[in-house]
Image: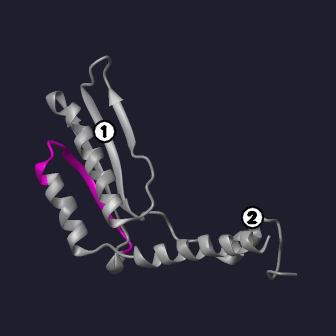
Amino acid sequence: MTNDISNQKLRGSEKLLSAWKNRTLTEDSVREIARALDESPAHVLGARVVGGSSATGVQLSLSYAGDDTPRCGNDILFWLKWHRMHGGEVHPPKIIIDGTPFPDLVRMELNFGDVTPGLPEIQDIGAKLGRGGSFGG
């Protein structure tokens, strides 16, 4: 049983160390994304950097039309390789396909790095649990 507890602590510490290691985007990792966009047939509908001066993630909204629609898979492959190289939590991309059986338009949102909002405040957690007043009592 002691082994189970130490394994849980190790997993928690690994998550913490991983979050610390991947806390910001590097200039090189962002340049890789920019190069991939230059080589892609996608139209960039929007780009958002999350985390302010210590950026933690980038959100891209891309559009593919006509003969370029099958090539969206290349961008998904790049996205997977980027996360494998630079880390961060991988959430599936959001994809909208218009047209069957052959897509006329594909829209895709890709998240690089960590684009999730911060952890909730302790007071917010207490309110969700239905506890009023100070926490812990």
Query: Is-magenta flag for residue 39?
Result: yes
Residue 32, quarter of picture: bottom left
Q: CA distance from mark 1 to mark 2?
A: 36 Å
Which three-letter amino acid code belongs to the residue tagged 1? Answer: Arg
Q: Residue at x 54, y 73 (%)?
A: 14
Q: Badge 2: how crowded within 10 Å, few (<14), some, or many (20+)?
A: few
Q: Is residue 103 left or right of residue 13?
A: left
- Residue holding disc 1: 107
Q: Residue at x 22, y 59 (%)?
A: 33
Residue 19, position as x, y percentages in the image: 47, 74
Quadrant (top left, top right, bottom left, bottom right) of the N terminus: bottom right
Q: In the image as oriented, which residue stretches furthest toward the left? A: 39
Quadrant (top left, top right, bottom left, bottom right) of the C terminus: bottom right
Residue 80, position as x, y percentages in the image: 33, 51
Residue 73, quarter of picture: top left
Q: Residue at x 54, y 76 (%)?
A: 16
Q: In the image as oriented, which residue stretches furthest toward the right? A: 137
In depth, the one of 9 and 96 nearer the eye is 9
Is there a contact, CB below 8 Å, between mark 1 and mark 2? no
Q: Is residue 2 left or right of residue 96?
A: right
- Residue holding disc 2: 128
Query: Is-magenta flag for residue 85?
Result: no
Rendered view: 95 above or below 89: above
